[in-house]
Image: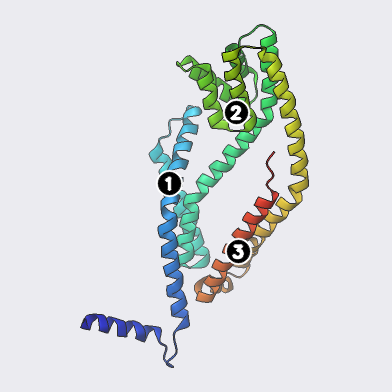
Amino acid sequence: MGSVRVAGSISLAILVGEGGGFNMDLILDVGIWVVLFGAAAVLLPPLWERVNRTADQAVEGFDRERLAIGRVRVLALIGSVSVVVGWVVWSATGSLLMAGLGLAMGLAAPGWVLGVYQNWRRRRFQVQFRDALIMVSNALRAGFTLSQAVDILGREMPWPSREEFARTARDRDLGLSLDEALERLADRMGGESLRIFVTAVEVGRQTGGDMAQLIDGMVKVIRERERVRERIDTLTAETRFQGYTLAALPYLLLALWVFVDGAGAREIFSTVWGRCLLACGTFFNVLALAVIRRMAAVRV
């Protein structure tokens, strides 16, 4: 009990300033570190899960490109990016707190870049999917089977549709049924149009019917959906641009301040009130961006 009382007295003496008042800077600093440790305890497990998922997706992509790059190398690359980002942030700010945030951003950045690339690749596939359906319909009318039409798509379509349909043909050749291979394609690329096509193929192969006529009807539906989506994108483009610009502007100005007056800009990272302002500003900035994106997101 005596040691506990002594420790409590020492802690109280540290928190109380020379004039008898509380040391607000120290209290705020301790509060910030407590919040950060709590946030780290909550966010590190999903962050590590995201890193592992990024590594698995990257290895799968390298395998698709016939590149022998293992999971350990990908994890080492992600770790190297994280260390470099943390060192750059620490060199610019001189703050261990910001360096830790930089390390976390470095861990998340490869996954974000990979996600952006995959979404761009899926969008290109969705744009090309209508032409792929037209080619399948023409092949069926010419007397080819659906399996042969998939082989034609794997040879004649532009990238990335050519690569994905060729992979579907390889899955079929390795023992999967065509329905299962198409379901794997739908799982990889997503998109409601592709899933509707896969479901229609499964039902059509079981019940019979004119598959070419069914695909022609799907082409008309997809064409109408694309027209509506383009109209919505045009109407919401200004809102999305304003949201991204307003979200990036504070950080661009901060980077310019660090570049022009590095010694003066470091004050905002080295003082407790400066870090509080950065944390609050970042929180409300992210919240506003999420609200703007939700307002501009319209599903078709």
Q: Is residue 229 above or below residue 203?
A: below
Residue drawn where x is 50% and y is 33% of the image: 61
Q: Horizontal placement of 293 versus 44: left or right?
A: right
Q: State the residue lying farthest toward the bottom.
A: 19
Q: Label for residue 276?
A: none
Location of mark 1 (residue): 49
- Element type at marker 3? helix
The x and y percentages for residue 62 are 48, 32
For this orientation, the residue located farthest to the top is 143
Total numbered badges shown on the rendered structure:
3
- Above or below residue 183? Residue 72 is below
Instruction: For the residues labelled 2 and 3, say whether their Cβ atoms are less than 8 Å apart.
Output: no
- The residue that appears at 47% across and 55% down in the rendered structure is 104
Mark 3 or mark 1, earlier in chain: 1
> Residue 81 at x, y = what percent?
47, 50
Left or right: residue 235 versus residue 149 is: right
**Residue identified by numbered label 3:** 284
Residue hosting label 2: 195
Q: Amino acid at mark 2?
A: Arg
**Residue at mark 3 to residue at mark 1: CA–CA distance:** 26 Å
Dot 2 alpha-carbon crowd within 10 angstroms: few under 14, some 14 to 19, many 20 or more: some
x and y percentages locating residue 164 in the rendered image: 57, 25
- Could you tell me if the residues under marks 3 and 1 are in contact, i.e. CB atoms within 8 Å? no
Looking at the picture, tell me which residue is in the foreground, 111 or 266. Answer: 111
**Dot 3 crowding, Cα within 10 Å, few <14, some 14–19, many 20+:** few
Nearer-the-camera pick, 218 or 92: 218
